[in-house]
Amino acid sequence: MTAFIHGPVKTEPGVLVHSRRSREAGAETWLLLAARDTKVARAEWDEFGVALLRCGTVFSAVRIPADIVYATTGTADRVEVAEYLTTALEGPCFYDGNSQAFYALTPCSTARRWDVPDTECLGADFFLGVPATSISEPDPRCAAWWVVPIGGPAAICDPEIVRSLVQRGQTRRSEAAALEAGKDA
């Protein structure tokens, strides 16, 4: 019989290892702090796979158009993009097929100073459809899924890393457009 661990486990003195489910539950609870009504948000996650959460309370979200991410990664392949973003962002990011955009979760304060063209940082007074923490691939209930799952409560992206990633994609997109224009000339 296999035992499933749902909480922290001590491996050696002073070291705790948390199970994936324990981290996921902590991240879910933390995200729900941004809900108007926790019970409603939980029910929306269960039924629709996505819940409306208020940005600017426990997180802000940088909306990055998919074409910028694809230019950065050099591919639109879902698995390759996920592998790249997992390493590059060092924090959670989800994709929304309806808006054709990636959303990197950042600190609340990010929206006050975000100034990167072609992107937007959603802060106070924005509501965002955030997928359930358990959705890490396309799901028939919703168009959004975690490309880089949230690693735990308050585990978010460094805004400077997000800025760098976006600027790299913008440069690569511009270079590709210039090459294409040169072919047509």
Image (cartoon, rainbow, N blue to C red):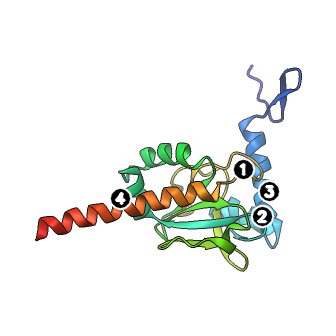
Find the distance from the CA under tag 1 to the CA under tag 2: 11 Å
- Three-letter amino acid code of the residue under disc 3: Trp
Q: Residue 164 shows which numbered tag?
A: none
The first of marks 4 and 1 along the sequence is 1
Helix, strand or loop at label 2? It is: loop
* Screen quadrant of the N terminus: top right
Residue placed under numbered mark 4 in the picture: 172
Q: Residue at x 10, y 71 (%)?
A: 185
Task: Indicate whether 91 appears above or below 41.
Answer: above
Tags 3 and 2 touching, CB below 8 Å = yes
The first of marks 1 and 2 along the sequence is 2
Looking at the rendered image, the disc whose residue lies closer to the viewer, 3 or 2, is 2
Residue placed under numbered mark 3 in the picture: 30
The residue most toward the left is: 185
Residue 21: image location, x then y, percent: 74, 40
- Three-letter amino acid code of the residue under disc 2: Val
